[in-house]
Structure formats: C-alpha cells, structure tokens
C-alpha cells in the first residue's frame, strides 16, 4: 500500500482543503499544505528505502480489477525509471508550497490544486495500466489551467487557454494511440505489456507511435510543438513555473520512454534517426530563441525547450548509457529549472521587472541582491554543464551514450549545450554586473538615463528553498551514484528491448 499512499496523501489533503471552513487564513492553509507535502516526501523516501536497485522490473506492485469491461485496472508499480521522478515531484511540490506568498484570492482552491496536481503526477509515474496513466495524465490539466488563469499575470487568460488547447490535443493523441493498440491487437487488456506491438504490422506500429510522439512532444515540449510554453511560464506565478518546468514537463519525457520506446521497439528503431535530428533541432532552436529574449523568465522557458531535447536524443540512441543520461537529465533539469525560476521570481518581486534591458548591477553587495545573484551564478553554471554540477553529469552521459549511434545529431546538440553558456552569461552580465541601476520609464530625467535604487533585502525564508535546490544540484553533480544506482539496472533493461546497430545515423 506504499504506492497507494503516494496518491491518497495529496488527494485526501486536497479534499480536506476544499472542505476547510472559509474563514481560514491563507497562512494556515499554506502551513497545512506544507505538512501534507512533508508527509508525502517522507513516504517517498520510505519507498526508496523499500526499493531494490538490483531488480530491473516493477516493484512494490499493487493490482486490483477496477472496470474489467474496458480493461481499466488499478495497477501501480515503481522501477528505476519512475522512482527518481516520484522523488522530484514530492520535493518540488513542497518547494512550490513553501515559496507561495500573498495568496489572498481563493487560497483554499489554490493549495488544493497544488496537492491535486502532485497526486495526479504520482499516479501517472506509477501507473502500469495505459488507461490509468491517461486518467492521471489528464487529471492535472484543469488544476494547472486554474493556477495559471486565476493566479497568473495580466495576460493569464490567453496563456491558460493556449495551454489548455495544446494539452487537450496531446491527451487526445495519446488516448487514440492506446485505443488503437487495443483495436489492432484485438485485446481489451491495457496493462503495460512491453512489445505487445509485435503483433502489429509495421505500418500500424508507426502510426500509433507517431501519435504518441506528437502527443508527448507537445507536453515535453519539442519544436515546433512548444508554442504554449513561453506564454504559460511568463504568465504563471513563480510557484507554478517551478512546478511546470520541474515536474510536469517530465510527464512528456517519461511517457515517451515508457510508452513509446517500451511498447513499440521495432517502430522506434526505424524512426530513431529522424528522432535524433528532431532532438538536435529542438536543442538548437531552444538555445537560439533563448539568446534573443530580454525577459528573464522567457529566456529560462526557452532553455527548457533546448534541454528537453537532450532526453529525446538519448532515447533515440537507445543505449544503456544514453538512457541513464536521460534519467539524469530529467532530474537535473527539474532541480536547475526550478532554481532558475525561483531566483527570477525573487528578482521580479524586489525590482518589479524581469527585463534585461532595464536591470543592472544586482550583485551590488550593499544595495542589491548579492546572495540571490550568487545563487543565480550557481544555477547558470549548472545549466551550462560545468563539472561538479548535475547538468554536467546528465549531458556527459547523454552525449557519451549517443555519439557512436548518431554522431551528427550529438555534435549539433553539443553546440546547443555551448549556446546555453552564451545566453545565461548574457543574463548574468546584463542583470547582475555593473553599477546598480534600473532604467526608469522614458521621459524621466536622470543622470546617464538610469535611476539609482536601494533594493529591499531578501529575507532568509525567501532564499532557503533556493539554497536547498542549489545543494541538490551540487550533490547530484558530486555524488552521481546516488541516482545512478537507482536507475542503472532499469535503463539497461529498457535499452535491451531494442538495440540500434552502432553507426546508424
């Protein structure tokens, strides 16, 4: 019942908050949410303690017949692919609750939606039944739409509607592929069965896999299916951006590995060269688009498009090393992107702007945000893949595992990795170095066209979550075996399902 507990804790907590008396203060509701999420994190750690990293298959399984007529079973399990993502979900949802401040509008609903999303994500990562996965995949859609449309920025309605449309299309394609698999194989058994597709003609396999690739490609997101992401991040509040980038995008990469590669290995092998090129295009486009941004939040959002392309490259190569790199990339990107969005949120709260054409000198030790700037430099170094950071380990494994299979796509992705350093150095140089000043509105007469400022200090409670994330980034970079021992056996078994001949490109 351990895995069911990971669903019940956030779901019951969400229901409790929705039924809580209306007079409760936002601070009390926030505290209750944090306690619930601490319990969820503790149970996740118990699952880690009960997990045998030497076993390749699903563990701690729970299976109960639910709606047998349509093949919907309550089937849960965890392996080295899903366990790290369950942990990152527990940790980052807790971070999102801790950094939530000044929620005066419908706080009960806000915190209930955070818990509902966390439970739905756990369910998606743990589901062993295709329809059960789809139910949890769709369950997070409306809560996230509410978090953007109600508590977002000035243009939140447009961004939330775009997110809703794109994600709805994603769900339709995924459900269509699952139903098509049952239709073409003549079965109503939707329990996760690797290589069930061997009963299908190659044309049918390619069709169903194509639907999954587009569906999950929207969620990741990959170019040109990424259009919803920058607007969603720009309009979302900082806690929602942390959750979106750190956790929810991983539903796409996880689904691509679990249901694309694992269910359709033969078709995957045929499409792998095209997938590798798609990955390289996403990496390069995301990096170049990030360079062109002046809004710090949009820059970080476009960086996610590029960094998620590494996961697709690793999956296309389908080697034990590259797939282990894919898991590292999902976890490290979750930590790094959450840290970046959190720090951008602090800058916006203290200065009222995210515009790189406006901000200067935030590292000023007396009047600026020196500690926030220092943490930003750590996050930037991690995202750029400097040794000693989580980003270096993940990118090294992805490139090392892919270079012999797809040398051209890997080299192009390495160029994109180099561009990461370019746009984040632009961010740090423009916003944090130089004389502390903020460009005033046009028409204000000030010396040198800039207005000297004295920024309010950042309270320790505001930076503690950032410190914890930065510590996680460094710890994963220095002690990668902490994650590698959990996932290595599972990713090696996944790569064994289908092996691409070395040199195919």
Image: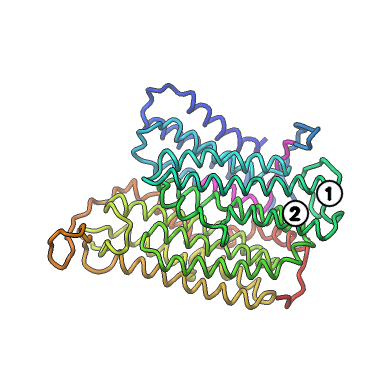
Secondary structure beneath label 2: helix
Which numbered circle lies on residue 208? 2
Of residues 365 and 96, the one nearer the viewer is 96
Q: Residue at left 64%, top 75%?
A: 403
Q: Is residue 100 above or below residue 482?
A: above
Q: Is residue 451 above or below residue 64?
A: below
Bounds of the magenta span? 73-91
Q: Are marks 2 and 1 in contact (CB under 8 Å)?
A: yes
Per the model, the C-alpha gap separating discs 2 and 1 is: 10 Å
Callout 2: few (<14), some (14-19), or many (20+) C-alpha neighbours within 10 Å?
many
Callout 1: few (<14), some (14-19), or many (20+) C-alpha neighbours within 10 Å?
some
**Which corner quadrant of the image does residue 203 belong to?**
bottom right
Using the rendered image of the protein, determine whether residue 478 is visible from the camera's viewpoint.
no
Q: Position of residue 340 (x, y in %)?
A: 42, 57
Q: Position of residue 26 (x, y in %)?
A: 37, 32
Secondary structure beneath label 1: helix
**Which corner quadrant of the image does residue 435 belong to?**
bottom left
Q: Residue at left 49%, top 71%?
A: 387
Q: Position of residue 93 (x, y in %)?
A: 49, 44
Using the rendered image of the protein, determine whether residue 72 is visible from the camera's viewpoint.
yes
Say whether residue 132 is left or right of residue 350.
Answer: right
Of residues 433 and 475, the one nearer the viewer is 433
The residue indicated by pointer 1 is 184
Q: Position of residue 94 (x, y in %)?
A: 47, 43
For the C terminus, the quadrant is bottom right
Taking the magenta stretch, the answer to whether it contains residue 378 is no
Q: Residue at left 46%, top 50%?
A: 232
For the N terminus, the quadrant is top right
Q: Residue at left 49%, top 27%?
A: 18
Taking the magenta stretch, the answer to whether it contains residue 90 is yes
Q: How many marks?
A: 2
């Amino acid at each position: 019942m351990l895995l069911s507990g990971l669903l019940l804790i956030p779901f019951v907590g969400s229901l409790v908050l929705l039924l809580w008396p209306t007079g409760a203060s936002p601070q009390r509701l926030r505290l209750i949410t944090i306690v619930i999420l601490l319990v969820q994190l503790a149970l996740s750690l118990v699952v880690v303690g009960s997990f045998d990293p030497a076993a390749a298959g699903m563990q701690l399984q729970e299976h109960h017949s639910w709606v047998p007529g349509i093949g919907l079973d309550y089937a849960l399990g965890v392996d080295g692919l899903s366990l790290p993502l369950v942990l990152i979900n527990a940790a980052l949802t807790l971070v999102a609750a801790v950094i939530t401040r000044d929620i005066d509008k419908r706080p009960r609903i806000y915190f209930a939606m955070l818990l509902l999303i966390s439970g739905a994500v756990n369910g998606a990562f743990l589901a062993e039944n295709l329809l059960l996965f789809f139910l949890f995949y769709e369950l997070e859609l409306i809560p996230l739409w509410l978090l953007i449309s109600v508590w977002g920025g000035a243009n939140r309605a447009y961004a939330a509607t775009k997110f809703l449309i794109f994600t709805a299309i994603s769900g339709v394609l995924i459900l269509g592929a699952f139903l098509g698999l049952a239709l073409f194989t003549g079965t109503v058994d939707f329990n996760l069965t690797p290589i069930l597709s061997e009963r299908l003609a190659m044309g049918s396999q390619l069709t169903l896999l194509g639907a999954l690739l587009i569906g999950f490609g929207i969620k990741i997101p990959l170019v040109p299916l990424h259009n919803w992401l920058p607007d969603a991040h720009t309009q979302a509040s900082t806690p929602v951006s942390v959750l979106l980038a750190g956790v929810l995008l991983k539903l796409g990469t996880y689904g691509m590995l679990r249901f694309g590669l694992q269910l359709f290995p033969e078709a995957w092998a045929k499409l792998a060269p095209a997938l590798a090129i798609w990955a390289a295009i996403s990496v390069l486009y995301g990096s170049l688009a990030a360079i062109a941004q002046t809004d710090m939040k949009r820059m970080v959002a476009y960086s996610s498009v590029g960094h998620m392309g590494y996961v697709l490259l690793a999956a296309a190569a389908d080697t034990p090393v590259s797939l282990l790199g894919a898991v590292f990339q999902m976890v490290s990107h979750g930590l790094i992107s959450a840290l970046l969005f959190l720090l951008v949120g602090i800058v916006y709260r203290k200065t009222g702007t995210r515009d790189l054409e406006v901000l200067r000198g935030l590292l000023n030790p007396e009047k600026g945000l020196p500690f926030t700037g220092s943490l930003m430099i750590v996050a930037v170094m991690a995202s750029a893949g400097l040794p000693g950071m989580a980003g270096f380990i993940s990118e090294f494994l992805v490139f090392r595992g892919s270079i012999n299979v797809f040398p051209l796509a890997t080299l192009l992705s390495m160029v994109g990795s180099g561009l990461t350093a370019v746009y984040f150095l632009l961010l740090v140089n423009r916003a944090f170095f130089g004389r502390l000043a903020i460009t005033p509105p046009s028409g204000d007469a000030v010396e040198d066209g800039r207005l000297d400022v004295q920024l309010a200090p950042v309270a320790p409670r505001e930076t503690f979550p950032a410190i914890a994330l930065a510590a996680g980034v460094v710890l994963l970079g220095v002690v990668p075996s902490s994650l590698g021992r959990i996932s290595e056996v599972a990713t090696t078994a996944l790569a064994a399902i289908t092996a691409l001949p070395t040199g195919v490109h």
